[in-house]
Every structure is written in structure tokens, then in C-alpha cells.
Amino acid sequence: MVRIRSSQKFFTEEEAVSLTGICAEHLRGFAELKHLGSLAVAADSAVRKWLFTSSDLMIMAVLHPRCQH
Ligand SMILES: [Zn+2]
């Protein structure tokens, strides 16, 4: 069960990992497969960050088992 504060609209990859129990590697692969989350690219850097909504996290938590490795 994922508990999310309703006031929070977007979650970083790190927050998504800790909330869903899915490791970063599998989380990203699953997000790409299911077209969840959005890629935020800062204009002045090469850093790309994934941002997830609370509904994205709910879908991932339901469809993807927690990582056990
Ligand atoms: Zn994993």
C-alpha cells in the first residue's frame, strides 16, 4: 500500500522508489514501458529527471511487485 500526501503533486524518481518499493532500475524501465511519468529536462543542463504524479505511483504500485533483490 502506497501512502501519498495529497498535497504533493509531483514526485522525483528517488521518492517514487522509496514509496513503491521498486528499485530505480526497474522503476524507470516500467515507467518507459507504460508511458508513466514525464521527463523534465533542464534547459541549461544535460541532467534529465523523471517526475511522477501520485496516480503514476498508484499504477506502478498496483502493477509492479516490490523489488526483492
Ligand atoms: Zn528491481
Image (spheres, helix red, strand yellow):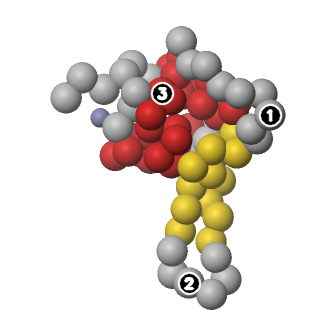
Q: Could you give the CA–CA distance between mark 1 and mark 2, rounded to whole angstroms?
A: 29 Å
Q: Earlier in the sequence, mark 3 or mark 1?
A: 1
Mark 3 vs mark 1, CA separation in Å: 18 Å
Q: Which residue is mark 2?
A: 45
Distance (Cα) linking label 2 and label 3: 28 Å
Q: Nearer the viewer, residue 43 or 3?
A: 3
Q: Nearer the viewer, mark 1 or mark 2?
A: 1
Q: Secondary structure at mark 2?
A: loop
Camera-side residue: 37 or 17? 17
Label 2 environment density (alpha carbons within 10 Å; few <14, some 14–19, many ≥20): few
Residue drawn at 53 percent across, 12 percent down: 1
Report whether 40 appears left or right of 16: right
Q: Earlier in the sequence, mark 2 or mark 3?
A: 3
**Residue visible at 40% across and 27% down?**
21
Disc sitting over residue 26 in the figure: none
> Which amino acid type is shown beneath numbered disc 1?
Ser
Circle 2: residue type: Ser
Kind of element beneath mark 1: loop
Residue on which disc 1 sits: 7
Residue at point 71%, 27% (across, down): 5
Camera sees residue 32: no
Q: Amino acid at mark 3?
A: Thr
Q: Position of residue 61 (x, y in %)?
A: 52, 22
Query: Which label sits on residue 20?
Result: 3
Asked if the residue at tag 2 contacts the one at tag 1, i.e. Cβ–Cβ closer than 8 Å, the answer is no
> Disc 3 on helix, strand or loop?
helix
